[in-house]
């Protein structure tokens, strides 16, 4: 363990914290691996009933894949990384059997937004911001956002958000049905704890049955595989390479996206 993920468990609730506040909790290679191992361990732990995932600090839940880490590596290395690390990570996040709550404060962008969407409940503070900026870098959101957001907010809103890359505030996300509970910034954790305790108090066979039935209705896997195909076409396009070349000069940490 590298300390990039902090874990606390009590009374059936596991609190998982992404611990890269200096990088706005961007997902680098080590964080991808550590977070996936943590979630898989929690899946296997019979004492854990619900997981709450959050970002360290109030500035960001997660701003997505750390694109700065990608600079300087070849297309072949990056493609291997996407196929062996990034895509399997998001698939694993969406194939959990136990419920997860995302407690969102600050920026929730790109792959960070996709990570939040993989949860079963999203609690957001009023200052939270959501967005899918991938098109700016010649990519599409290929970690599940297009599939999940379309089912939540509809195709028109999903296409508009993904094609423009614009950010939306927590109120707009709530009005779209993306956010389950909109609360004051200083009570995000408290509300997440309340919801987690309610879930824990119920019969877990039924809780997981609800999750399984709704997830089956969503039909995530086929759409996810198609998104990867489209993403790979985008990844090797000359336009994507030109856009990413501008990243170092133009992007701030909060602009990081997901591949």
Image (tube, helix red, strand yellow):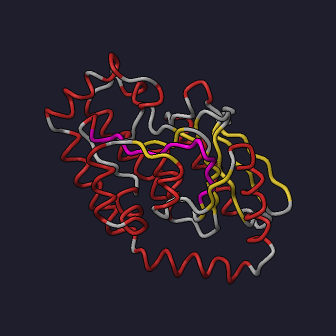
- Residue 54's place in the image compared with 145, above or below, is above
Drawn side of residue 119 relative to residue 53, left or right: left
Query: Looking at this rendering, what residue extends furthest in the left direction?
Result: 238
Q: Residue at 76%, 81% (x, y): give it.
A: 203
In the image, residue 191 above or below residue 57: below
| Residue 144 x/y as whole percent | 40, 57
Q: Which of 78/223 is in front?
A: 223
In percent of width and height, residue 217 lies at 44, 80
Q: On the picture, is 255 further left or further right than 6?
A: left
- Which stretch did the figure color magenta? 122-135
Residue 85 seen in this snapshot: no
The quarter of the picture where the N terminus appears is: top right
Question: Is 222 one of the magenta-colored residues?
Answer: no
Tell me which residue sits at (43%, 67%) in the image. Answer: 152
The spot of residue 15 in percent (x, y) is: 74, 50
Does 200 appear above or below 78?
Answer: below
Quadrant including the C terminus: top left
Q: Quadrant of residue 47?
A: bottom right
Residue 128 part of the magenta-drawn span? yes
Q: Which residue is pictured at 30% across the width and 65% down the height?
A: 155
Identify the residue shown where x is 41% and y is 42%.
167
Looking at the image, which is closer to me, 207 or 250? 250
């Amino acid at each position: 363990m590298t300390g990039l993920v902090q874990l606390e468990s009590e009374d059936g609730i596991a609190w998982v914290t992404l611990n890269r506040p200096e990088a706005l909790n961007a997902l680098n290679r080590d964080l991808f691996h550590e977070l996936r191992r943590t979630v898989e361990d929690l899946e296997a732990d019979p004492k854990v009933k619900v997981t709450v995932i959050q970002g360290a600090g109030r500035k960001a839940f997660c701003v997505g894949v750390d694109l700065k880490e990608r600079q300087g590596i070849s297309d072949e290395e990056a493609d291997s990384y996407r196929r062996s690390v990034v895509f399997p990570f998001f698939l694993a996040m969406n194939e959990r059997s136990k419920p997860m709550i995302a407690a969102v404060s600050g920026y929730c962008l790109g792959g960070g937004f996709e990570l939040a969407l993989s949860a079963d409940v999203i609690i957001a503070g009023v200052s939270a911001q959501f967005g899918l900026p991938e098109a700016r870098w010649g990519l599409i959101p290929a970690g599940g956002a297009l599939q999940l957001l379309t089912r939540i907010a509809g195709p028109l809103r999903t296409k508009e958000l993904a094609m423009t890359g614009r950010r939306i505030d927590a109120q707009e996300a709530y009005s779209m049905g993306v956010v389950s509970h909109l609360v004051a910034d200083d009570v995000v954790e408290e509300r997440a704890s309340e919801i987690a305790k309610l879930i824990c108090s119920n019969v877990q066979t039924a809780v997981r049955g609800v999750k399984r039935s709704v997830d089956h209705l969503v039909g995530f896997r086929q759409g996810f595989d198609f998104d990867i195909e489209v993403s790979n076409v985008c990844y090797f396009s000359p336009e994507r390479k030109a856009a990413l070349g501008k990243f170092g000069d133009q992007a701030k940490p909060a602009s990081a996206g997901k591949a």
